[in-house]
Amino acid sequence: FVDIDPRTFNIDIQQVEQAISSKTKAVIPVHLFGQPADLHPLNELCKSNNLLLVEDCAQ
């Protein structure tokens, strides 16, 4: 679990990077309050760590 960026209310990418461990399998950003998550850096982070990126567009 990582918290949000208080400016955007979206997933805090820096916290994601710090939270990745050997048990991490996927990252699930949520597009919240009409603010799309910044997927490009998340996608690059997931690729470099061999993780799945699953978008939650239901909000």
Image (cartoon, rainbow, N blue to C red):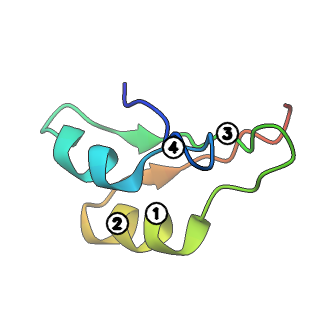
Label 1 or label 4, whichever comes before in sequence order: 4
Q: CA distance from mark 4 to mark 3?
A: 7 Å
Q: Residue furthest front?
A: 7
Image x and y of residue 2, in percent: 37, 31
Q: Secondary structure at mark 3?
A: loop
Name the residue located 39 percent from the left edge and 54 percent from the top edge: 13
Of 42 and 35, the residue lying toward us: 35
Image x and y of residue 52, in percent: 46, 51
Q: CA distance from mark 1 to mark 4?
A: 10 Å
Q: Amino acid type of disc 1?
A: Leu
Labels 4 and 3 touching (C-beta < 8 A): yes
Q: Quadrant of the C terminus?
A: top right
Name the residue located 62 percent from the left edge and 49 percent from the top edge: 8
Label 4 or label 3, whichever comes before in sequence order: 4
Q: Quadrant of the N terminus?
A: top left
Mark seen at residue 30: 3
Q: Residues within 10 Å of mark 3 (few under 14, many from 20)?
A: some
Q: Secondary structure at mark 4?
A: loop
Q: Is residue 25 left or right of residue 36?
A: left
Name the residue located 45 percent from the left edge and 72 percent from the top edge: 41
Mark seen at residue 45: 2
Q: Which residue is denoted by mark 1 in the rendering? A: 42
Q: Amino acid type of disc 4?
A: Ile
Please name which of the two marks, 1 or 4, marks the residue nearer to the observer: 4
Q: Amino acid type of disc 3?
A: Val
Asked if residue 45 is positioned above or below residue 13 in the image, the reply reads below
Labels 2 and 1 touching (C-beta < 8 A): yes
Q: Is residue 55 left or right of residue 40?
A: right
Q: CA distance from mark 2 to mark 1?
A: 5 Å
Mark seen at residue 11: 4
